[in-house]
Amino acid sequence: MIDIAKEELKEEFSDYGSGSVGLAQINAIAGDIEYNSKKVLKYIIHAQNIGLDLVIFPELALTGYPVGDAILRYPLLADTNMKWLNEIAKLTTKTIALIGFLEPANDKNNKFYSSVAVLGEGKVLNIIRKSFVDKNYEFNDCKYIISSDNSDISTINVNGIKYAMLVGEDYSCENKFSGQNFDIIINCSASVTYTKKEQCKFDRLSALSQKYSAPLIYVNQVGAVDNASFAGLSAVFDKEGKLFARARAFDEQFLIVNPSKNLGRIYPLIRGLELMSEDDDKFSLDYDSDMERTYNILIQGIKDYFGKTGFKRAVLGLSGGLDSTVCAVLLTDALGKENVFGISMPSKITSDTSKNDAQMLAQNLGIGFTQAPIKEMFDTTNNCLQKLFADVEQNWDCRYKKSFTPDNIQARSRAMFLWGVSNEFDSCLPIATSDKSEAYMGYATINGDMSGGFAPIADVTKTKLFALARWMNENRPQKNAIPQSVIEKRPGAELAINPETGKPLIAEDALMPYEFLDEVIWRIENKHQSYDDMLNSEFLYEKSHKVTPEQKQQWLEKFYRRMATALYKKSIMPPYVIVDSPSYNFSQPITSGRINYKSESEEIIRAKLQRIF
Amino acid sequence: MIDIAKEELKEEFSDYGSGSVGLAQINAIAGDIEYNSKKVLKYIIHAQNIGLDLVIFPELALTGYPVGDAILRYPLLADTNMKWLNEIAKLTTKTIALIGFLEPANDKNNKFYSSVAVLGEGKVLNIIRKSFVDKNYEFNDCKYIISSDNSDISTINVNGIKYAMLVGEDYSCENKFSGQNFDIIINCSASVTYTKKEQCKFDRLSALSQKYSAPLIYVNQVGAVDNASFAGLSAVFDKEGKLFARARAFDEQFLIVNPSKNLGRIYPLIRGLELMSEDDDKFSLDYDSDMERTYNILIQGIKDYFGKTGFKRAVLGLSGGLDSTVCAVLLTDALGKENVFGISMPSKITSDTSKNDAQMLAQNLGIGFTQAPIKEMFDTTNNCLQKLFADVEQNWDCRYKKSFTPDNIQARSRAMFLWGVSNEFDSCLPIATSDKSEAYMGYATINGDMSGGFAPIADVTKTKLFALARWMNENRPQKNAIPQSVIEKRPGAELAINPETGKPLIAEDALMPYEFLDEVIWRIENKHQSYDDMLNSEFLYEKSHKVTPEQKQQWLEKFYRRMATALYKKSIMPPYVIVDSPSYNFSQPITSGRINYKSESEEIIRAKLQRIF
């Protein structure tokens, strides 16, 4: 009997009898065909051993998905996946295996089909090609993947049951089904997870099974590829459209079902994945319903980024602030406490509370910890720079002499320490702790806190991070690992003293209240609102705070000004996990920062044009 | 008479009589509709004043192209360009203006047409929509731009001449033309320039005019948008397909022609733009034919990145090496010598030659210059790090104690200086001097020489850079600005001493000969060759050097290993100019680095799979 460790299998075997099917929800490594093929074969052998009729893998299971332009640049990739497929085929017996692979379109150079091979009895019995390639899709598949021109649905017969095969978004091609005849529908997919998308997809699949009075089996990929997360959640619906089996989210799993007999098990859904997008009409600080999903996406993202690139250890600065604290907890949970090292790097501005909070957090988590003050680094750099500035000033009559230059030296000295540790210790990545609110505002130092090999929380806004910190304190096995004062204090980089208060500058004083800032981001990403839309409607923050129209206008103007100049900072942000769907692959030229986000009346436009005469 | 400065107009007016047309080859700023609209109106007024029949602008002239996902996120962008269009229309008189703009598809949410408006007599006379939206296109237009379903070619009548209108790639839709009747073809375009593409495009346009016996007017955008370059080169062909007018490359221009009378002027082509891709079958070190094009793309790229983001000044480290030297010359030519400051930042390894070369270069170019040794920075950082490493070692038993940690401190100390100057002086960007060969190999220090606000030469390989340095020494008005010794010495980062020679480590010893390395890159990008393809065919380098099969294998293996781990470094490379077309928007997940670039035989695959049983 093939050796698949229990925890790899993650399914207690139930003998559901004839017509049983295994759903192999695997976490493929994009591009690593040998790894993926071996994993596929392991599950096939297991399925054969326990006498299943059928074992089903996700779309493009052999190459992993996505591999991007590597498809075009390395034709060997497609060749190799064909070779492995053919060799796997030879090892199949009675159990039929359905495997997603990349099929070169022989008549078209550099074009491919996303196909599913039907393997059994030692050979490739059939190949089914995807018909519908969505040109709006995140990963620009339409650059390489072409649609099959077969408009009929493909079917296969296994032990007297007729299965209809759909690859990926083919389930949205209603016309494929007309006049066809089948018992069960199968959908092999590699479908990225979005905020509030999963239930919509389930509703569609359920409606399909209901409409055609046939059970539907949906097998999806799990795991993260760079910033993209796949949730898994493979599922089976009965012919009334009722869910009767579902695999776990964010976890590799081999789920056994019998769709003819409605046998299978529904594993509990992670909270947040049941949300529907219609719930989402107003900005809210009540993130609670989305916390479990957020946490799990972040953990899978960190784990897979490290695991798939071969890094093992993380080193990060612990400032005692919210961002680095949340990062430390996530890294601990994703990589293990023995693989995380936190360094408190105080300057003269750093408060005792901050130092204590950093140390207490490290203690609570059990991660490595030390303190490395940056005073010497700062003094030396600052001295060298003062001399240098005097020289440059001879040529350039535009010196600022403001505090942000020395402020940034502090952040950069810290990054110097982290990259040093990363160089000196094996398989170690330094962590960039920037959050989404600050990334939008460019409120982060290049080569400073923005710098690292990975940025776990760069798609999580500050208000959501507060919620996440509270949630983790309540829901992790170890309660209250995050010191209460971290959650209670107002965020600030502790790089500068506010001349008005004599105390460290608070980020909200430099920017605007985070509640307000995060709602602006939310309105832009979700509602595509303009400056004027926002000026003329009430913000959540305004319900509990008096904000004058001038103040609101000033914040909004600051937001757009900073967002435009932050485009170039965002372009060099390290890889990160996407948590909020509207962030997906958003790309805008850096040189297009002069967009006017305010509406202008025809009268003003006319006057501006008249001035040209 | 409207005030367009002579150098803005860049055309000596010739009175070509009735039927004269102005080709407004403008450099639009993506997203800055006000700027683009005012520029458009200026040219319209000028065309009216000199009595032209028609003035033609590029595709999407009002929004600039591309603006990317900003189209979806800021619906105001499309609204605003409609408003400006309508107001411009009111100011037109007898001269007809054809202007590319973004037209919301009213029946489809978040979808747009790329349209050309026909303005005249104070109103919008007609709107012509693009029919063919290429889904392979670099900028993923098909996410937002839909095809018009009008299969007939649209025509407009101006002063008794019937013009057929094509938007962008519509010229490739042959079926549009069938049974239609027109005198002259117009193509409004925003077509990015590729290596060896321009002549192919001209051949196609020429063939079209010949086939339909009609002169063809092609108006293209000029300028750079982040990494994308538009060459301009607007052109007119007579009805025999012969070119009789062409605007300059990489320069805004208003070109006046009379297509009915074959009147117009052909401005000289920049060398390299006449090349055809079939020339390109073998790797060659004879870059000479492509130097003028390369230089001009780099200059336009730097100028427009700075100009369009609002930066004015550049600061860079001058090591006396090739990369920083070429960057300094390019920046001087693009931004003006008064806006460039070079800093020599020697360490104890830096040779006197290097220091002298840096200083002499700065003197020759007339840019700002000073010397700022990094010894103090290095010593302080190294001391602090040694203490820190001892602490970390308590937890992690995987310390390297190799020289690359201190080596990297040197590169990072230099970046610290550059970012300090950038912070302290107004509108100043620090420059990353990494070249393409080193970027592929990850042979650059993160937060060190890889770090900056812009990376001018990150798409130029080392051997091409040598050629460029020689070319600039011969072809810039000031001859031999680059000291001969910079071109003659073998490149090395001067970060480390080679234990074998006792001298600074030479890059080629650490990597492989650049000639060989650059051919590997060339074969991957242009020929999509695999490891085995390369192993089994002769390299140019092998014609003049004895290379054992073991040595070749070792270099290739090093190449693939380094390329895979460099994927994550490349992801945080600052914005740069794309010079070689195969680099266009190449994207591959960082976590897909485990691709096996070697072919495997069926036997080996079989054996590996058998081991699973």
Image: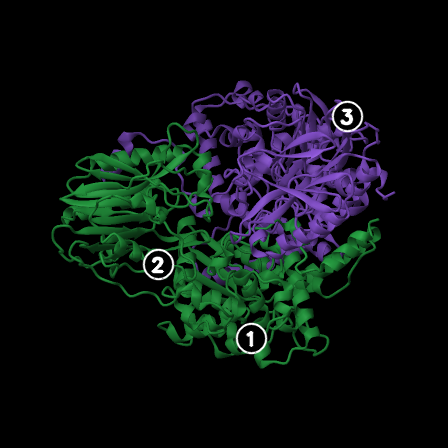
Chain colours: A green, B purple
Residue B31 in the image: state x and y as whole percent: 66, 50
Percent x, y of residue A51: 13, 48
Q: Which residue is mark 1?
A: A540
**Cβ atoms under marks 2 and 1 closer than 8 Å:** no
Q: Are marks 1 and 3 on the same chain?
A: no
Task: Have a look at marks 2 and 1 and say if they share a chain.
Answer: yes
Vertical order, A361 against A568 (above or below): below
x then y, percent, for residue B134: 52, 37
Q: Earlier in the sequence, mark 2 or mark 1?
A: 2
- Residue B490 sits in which quadrant? top right
Identify residue type, mark 1.
Answer: Leu
Q: Which mark is residue A250?
A: 2
Q: Residue at x 43, y 68 (%)?
A: A279
Figure check: A392 above or below B388: above
Residue type pointed to by label 2: Phe
Q: Position of residue A449 (x, y in %)?
A: 58, 61
Which residue is labeled 3 in the image? B264
Viewer-proximal residue, B132 or B434? B132
